[in-house]
Amino acid sequence: MFFGKKILKSEAQKAAEALPFTKKVQFLPSGDFAETKAAVSKDKGFILTLEPVNYYADKYRYILCTFYYDESYDTIYYSLELCVNDRTADRSEFFGADFELMRSVLRKFGQNIVKNA
């Protein structure tokens, strides 16, 4: 039984989940997800090398990228999840990002965001 089992959250995860907005996009998995997690840990911009995919095109196996952000885009975090048959099979840690990285990722999906000055 799982009664009383606490799930430990990192400080980045607590900060991300406290933010009011989320945006989700999907990528095609390329190779092993553990390698993708390691590459993103080393270089946050590695996410730009992943191939975007429409959820309906390949909904059986994809990488879900969830951005957590505030209204002014000053605080942005993202995490990656490997989803198989719409269930999370593996999850990355939470990474900090800046506005330019988030905007570049969303542009790959035809979405443009503008930071209000």
Image (cartoon, rainbow, N blue to C red):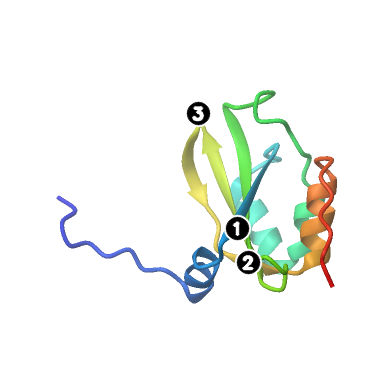
Q: The residue tagged with tag 2: helix, strand or loop? A: strand
Distance from Cα at disc 2 to Cα at disc 1:
16 Å
Q: Amino acid at mark 2?
A: Phe
**Position of residue 73 in the picture relative to residue 59 (left or right):** right
- Indicate which label's residue lies in the foreground, 3 or 1: 1
Distance from Cα at disc 3 to Cα at disc 1:
25 Å
User: Callout 1: few (<14), some (14-19), or many (20+) C-alpha neighbours within 10 Å?
Assistant: some
- Indicate which label's residue lies in the foreground, 2 or 1: 1
**Position of residue 110 in the picture relative to residue 92 (left or right):** right
Residue occupying image coordinates x 54% and y 72%? 12
| Precedes in sequence: disc 3 or disc 1 | 1
Q: Residue 50: give x, y in percent of width and height.
A: 77, 45
In terms of image quadrants, where is residue 7? bottom left
In terms of image quadrants, where is residue 75? bottom right
User: Callout 3: few (<14), some (14-19), or many (20+) C-alpha neighbours within 10 Å?
Assistant: few
Dots 3 and 2: beta carbons under 8 Å?
no
| Precedes in sequence: disc 3 or disc 2 | 3
Quadrant including the C terminus: bottom right
Which residue lies under the disc numbered 2? 95
Disc on res. 73: none
Which residue lies under the disc numbered 1? 21
Residue occupying image coordinates x 65% and y 24%? 56
| Precedes in sequence: disc 2 or disc 1 | 1
Which residue lies under the disc numbered 3? 85
Q: Amino acid at mark 1?
A: Phe
